[in-house]
Image (tube, helix red, strand yellow):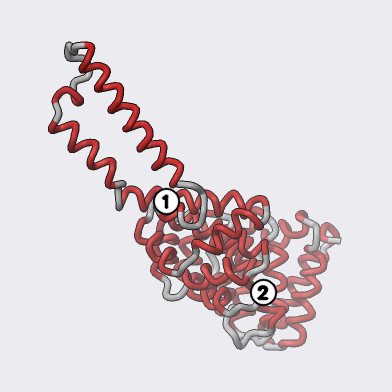
Amino acid sequence: MGAKGFVEGLLRFLDSAVLEGNAIAQEVGAMALFNLAVNNNRNKELMLAAGVILLLERMISNSSADESATALYLNLSCFEQAKSIIGSSKAVPFLVQLLGDETDAQCKLDALHTLYNLSTDHSNIQSLLSAGIVNRLQSLVVSGDHTWTEKSITVLLNLASSEAAKEEMVSASGLITGLASVLDTGEPVEQEQAVSCLLLLCNGNDKCSQLVLQEGVIPALVSMSVNGTTRGREKSQRLLVLFREQRQRDHPPANQHRVVLESSRDPTRASPSAPESKPLSRSMSRRKVRKGLSLSFLWKSKSYSSSGYLL
């Protein structure tokens, strides 16, 4: 149908409807284009070449037909070549704005899915951040409404491929708390997404790790490491190990300091290659046995229990 001029004809129809300010005609034209674009990349390509993005920009600036415009954006955003074009247009602030509470639920869901598609293209991340997407997503995550939780966190995961986005996410008021709450109360797939996001944010960021630990996430992570999805178990275990390693860096075991101190005071222990008499060798062997037992005891105490992760 696209090759027979339907795309061009519908775009002219929509253009006239926008010029006349006819909201009903705009909705009809946009949904007709939507139907032509479903599972048809050739028609999507024709629409892009004919200037559908500029036409949609005019439509969203002067119309109340947000639902139909958003649906068409969603359809077009499934086409790889359209992502960067949409991402550099006025569509981004429009779609981010639709994530507000006052938006119709289906329109908001379409906007969220469109933003997810756009976030898979790294070149769009800066424009998404500039439009305030982190704060909007944070509001959806903390709302506790499962309608938005999983997809919102998935968008955050895509954004976290950018260092600038990670910094903004860590600084966003309430986002870490919201993600921590999902670990406690979310569905298994939501918990998987939340722990994946926290792992990305905490890796190499001690400040973020401290913020997450302050939320008391250890019991939830331990539970996930046993009862979560396959990916959730793997991610929760990695996050627990990360927390434990940071704890050990910040608070080294006291025995380690004592061994180093004793070595500095006893030249015979610091220089094992020095000539030794046989009695001294037997004495050294006994000390090594005791030291080995001590280290063995320490290792056993660092089990993968909920308390062990905090050592």
* Residue nearest the viewer, comparing 30 with 181: 181
At which x and y percent is residue 192?
Answer: 62, 59
Residue type of the residue flagged with mark 1: Arg
Q: Give the left or right position of residue 154, taking residue 292 as reference.
A: right
Relative to 270, 159 lies left or right:
right
Give the x, y percent position of residue 149.
62, 71
Q: Residue at 44% across / 50% down in the picture?
A: 242
Q: Residue at x 80, y 58 (%)?
A: 39
- The amino acid type of the residue labelled 2 equals His
Q: Does 294 sit above or below residue 106?
A: above
Q: Is residue 262 left or right of residue 70?
A: left
For label 2, the SS is helix
Residue 132 seen in the figure: no
Ranked by sequence position, the earlier of labels 1 and 2 is: 2
Q: Nearer the viewer, residue 293 or 148?
A: 293
Alpha carbon distance from label 1 to label 2: 31 Å
Residue 262 located left or right of residue 311: left
Please tell me which residue is depicted at 49% across the width and 70% down the height of the picture. Answer: 134
- Mark 1 near mark 2, Cβ–Cβ under 8 Å? no
Front of the two marks 1 and 2: 1
Q: Residue at x 69, y 67 (%)?
A: 74
Residue 173 badge: none
- Tag 1 residue: 244
Res. 146 mark:
2
Pointer 1: residues within 10 angstroms few (<14), some, or many (20+)? some
